[in-house]
Amino acid sequence: MDVGPPKRFAHLHQHTAYSLLDGAARIKDLMAWVKEVTPGDAVVAMTDHGNLHGAVEFTKAAYAAQVKPIVGFEAYMTAGSRFERRRPEGKLDGGYYHLTLLAKDMTGYRNLCKLSSRAYLEGFYMKPRIDFELLEQHHEGIIALSGCLGAQLPRTILDVGPEAGEEVLQRYLRLFGDDYFLEFQDHGLEEQQRLNPVLRAFADRYGIAMVATNDGHYVRKEDARAHEALLAIQTKTVLSDEHRFRFPCDEFYVKTPEEMALAVPENAYPGALANTMVVADRCTLELPIGDRRVYQMPELPIPAGRTLAEQLRVSAYEGLGRRYPERITEAFWRGYLAAAGAASAASDAGLAAGSAAGVSADAAPLEKVWLRLARHAEAGRRAMREGEHYDRYETPHLDAFAAVAALIIPAAASAQSTLQSARSHNGVVAAAQPLATEASVRMLEMG
């Protein structure tokens, strides 16, 4: 039967090496293969077991390979409470189930981060588990797929019956609505042959969109043996052990669109292949990394009439005084401002900065002294030049202060003689500070 390749297809259930001791797909190899088998419209999702550890590496590699990344994870879902610590007791209490979750946008990504983190912090018992309470709190912006044979809906259908499965389905539908998709896989397993017709009936009954996935755990079919070795390490056994845990076949790889069309044919599951791209199109998350990185400064309460740079300097001046109260005194700051005012007289930029503050070094409140000094410093900003990586500062006001201090601070001067000397130099009263203080402020001003 000639089914023909799907026009567009995306792998929405794919593990990487961050599915620890279970995923054998190196991210760079995965991206190269996805790009090779779907060169025109390459999309792949990351759905590692219980974590988002590989999200940044996965996204960077996808951007570099010109593949659209979808960030998600395969959550461990408990039927009861995540706070319960006990072994499973029956078919409907399997300890944990799988659930495929994908981020549609930044809200969804943040919610995935919360789910994964709280699974480790609150629900860890054998695996990092979430429950319905957490899903209800953090489901916004997330697409859910019904999952593999280890998921709650398939296991309930197979172990208990379709009626019980329908109750589970309804609960997920109430939570996710149109962002819930029924997941179809076919690796030639007997359980899948029993499960998929029931899922198809649910899809028809409730109008739920179907998607085809392959639960990839390695990149190419020939990597199945390496994956077996990884599982042997996980289960502390050897490849020669005939009774060791292993996957039932070698079909859990990144199949081509043509192979997926054979596994999940359109005539049996209409729309399941094309709907993978419907999901992909809904997922618009772009992590701000690499060339897309943006600096997100917190929203700070800045007093009216000040810039962020000026307020940063004022806060730094204040903090310097708290750290060195015996050396950085109020007299120091007033002396510094007096020297800065003298230096600004020869500079139009400096005059503008000084006149903007409109205060006297002797009479102004200390907060305004700091603000005026901050404006003197910002007036010396020089734009970045070719070959440089950031703006630089010229500090004539600080140079003037250093020169005055060098003249009027004899090594053994008394406080009285220092004060008299300071008054004879443009009213600078900060000369009681050692030159080491000037060096500290120079470091502060120059960044």
Image (cartoon, helix red, strand yellow):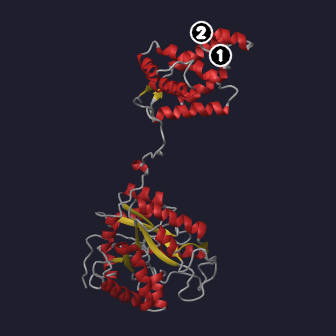
* Amino acid type of the residue tagged 2 in the rendering: His
Q: Given contact means CB atoms under 8 Å apart, are the residues at marks 1 and 2 in contact?
A: yes
Residue assigned mark 2:
425
Residue 207 vs 66, above or below: the answer is below
Query: Looking at the image, which is closer to me, 276 or 14?
Result: 276
Q: Say which label, 1 or 2, has the lower sequence index.
A: 2
Q: CA distance from mark 1 to mark 2?
A: 10 Å
On-image quarter of the N terminus: bottom left
Q: Where's residue 81, x and y in %?
A: 57, 77
Category of crowding for the residue at label 1, using alpha-carbon neighbours closer than 10 angstroms: few (below 14), some (14–19), many (at least 20)? many
Q: Where's residue 101, x and y in %?
A: 44, 70
Which residue is pictured at 42% across the width and 78% down the height?
Answer: 172
> In which quarter of the view is residue 78 placed?
bottom right
Residue 5 lies left or right of residue 224; in this view the side is left
In terms of secondary structure, where does tag 2 sit?
loop
Category of crowding for the residue at label 2, using alpha-carbon neighbours closer than 10 angstroms: few (below 14), some (14–19), many (at least 20)? some
Residue assigned mark 1:
431
Query: Looking at the image, which is closer to me, 244 or 194?
Result: 194
